[in-house]
Image: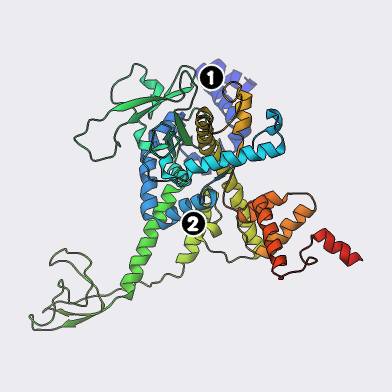
Amino acid sequence: MNTMDRLIGYFNPNAALKRSIARTKIDILNSGYGNHGASTSKKSLKGWRSKGGSVKEDIEDNVPLLRERSRDLYAGTPLATGAIKTLRTNVVGSGLKLNAQIDYELLGMTEEEADAWETKAEREFSLWADSIHCDAQRMNNFYELQQLVFISQLMSGDVFALLPYIPRVNMPYDIRVQLIEADRVCNPGKVYQEKDKIVNGVEINQSGEVVAYHIANIHPLANNYFDKKKWVRVQKFGPKTGRPNILHLMEMERPEQRRGVPILAPVIESLKQLGRYTEAELMAAVVSGMFTVFIKSNVSDEGNPLGSASEDVEVVDDGGEQSYELGNGAIVGLGPDESIETANPGRPNTAFDGFVTSICRQIGSALEIPYELLLKHFTASYSASRAALLEAWKMFKMRRVWLANDFCQPIYEEWLAEAVAKGRIKAPGFFHDPLVRKAYSGAEWIGPSQGQIDPLKEVNAAAKRVAEGFSTRTRETVELGNGDFFRNNRLRIIEERLRREGGLTSVAQGSTVEEKEEREEE
């Protein structure tokens, strides 16, 4: 307290105390972020009213409405549909394919033995994955299930997969994949003593670990008034075997989050408003394209009075006598004392495209999709277009790794355990040592290639990387065409031999690059 405050305090202690408290508040507010983002005195931030909450208040309580609006946008807004399908096509494509990669050194195997084991495992997995029998509903094969899982997670925020065993004729493997839509995992209707430990159908224990999920037998939004709603409690892991009973695919934003948020959540308002603007501009353009001639007559029974459509008029609705219609070059008669006034809507709007592009840039930034890719409109230079694709592929690869780790790999490991247990695949020590089991379960999941804007430049760059040792032929084959180098190499050997035998090429022409270089030096 300074001299002035002490003097005021001598005559008015209450006023001096208020001055001291006010000065302390100013010191606090004007330090660090108090001068910037946390300032409450700046005019630009004074009116900013924000209220923070826990994960439950900020996310969990809003997820159901976000989910419904996200689906509505997907169903009726082309830009939202295109964004989700663009992600699906580039991340999953026709499906992530298994490439078994066991740790043969740990297992004491030679490279030849490891290659033979991997080939057999891939062949056996294809027997199960290529068939619709892998789906509990017998609707999709494993690769189509990947597409459905990914698009559902983007649209709803999360999706669930049960792994039941269902024997079927002519299928040696009994494990199945049963997908559960996000809405069906919800709070049970009956009251639990520890209801605060169950949020949106996800149950946790005292330490915060997710232990079970509560699944409704019917969809909560279904118009079913006769079936009684019941819930099944599914433990996340089997208590004896530790086997995963259910897979929960979601993207977390905050610690202690239990349910996922739709990818469109941050741009729901922008997409909805843009959709409304697009519909309004489209209707205005349609109205502007209509040209209707009105004839005013003193005889009321001639022509078609206003409110009744002629044969050339497109009926927009069946609203009755008071329904006003326009037509393409239609002629409508007016009754006595009736007149019409017209307005020029001024369409098409020349500013429409620029405005939509500007909003799409912001939406693309939030979704990590460059607007060129979002709109499928590449008008920039090769370098700019390639930079946009490379930036997008950082995100595509990240999501592909996520899908492989959370969906493909766990299912493959459960399938492999069944294959080993039934003796269709030999894997000594698989069930006795977790390290050995991990060594046998190693795999990578290969998805669609990035594609090229200029194939010649891309191939030359790939050849240069291989020549300098920065990459391998196997990797570049996958990146350029999603192929298999070893299979291509074997086929090339056969092709070149057949060409030589058929007289289409000489031995010298079919020689290796090194041999050609040696001949050139000679």
Q: Nearer the viewer, residue 194 or 278?
A: 194
Residue 123 place in picture, x, y as percent: 55, 43
Residue type, numbered disc 2 = Ile
Among the 4 quarters of the image, the one containing residue 49:
top left
The residue lying at 47 percent from left, 43 percent from top is: 142
Residue 97 place in picture, x, y as percent: 55, 45
Q: Which residue is mark 2?
A: 359
Q: Is residue 100 visible?
A: no
**Nearer the camera: disc 1 or disc 2:** 2
Horizontally, residue 423 falls left or right of residue 195, namely right
Element type where label 2 sits in the image:
helix
Q: Nearer the viewer, residue 273 or 395?
A: 395
Horizontally, residue 459 falls left or right of residue 183, namely right
Q: Compared with residue 354, is residue 185 higher up or lower down, i.e. above or below?
A: above
Residue 389 place in picture, x, y as percent: 60, 56
Q: Which residue is mark 1?
A: 17
Residue type, numbered disc 1 = Leu
The residue lying at 67 percent from left, 54 percent from top is: 490
Element type where label 1 sits in the image:
helix
Q: Quadrant of the N terminus?
A: top right
- CA distance for labels 1 and 2: 53 Å
Q: Is residue 480 visible?
A: yes
Instruction: Return the residue found at the far front.
Output: 501
Instruction: Return the residue found at the far right.
Output: 522
Q: Earlier in the sequence, mark 1 or mark 2?
A: 1
Q: Residues within 10 Å of mark 1 (few under 14, many from 20)?
A: some
Among the 4 quarters of the image, the one containing residue 56:
top left
Q: Quadrant of the C terminus?
A: bottom right
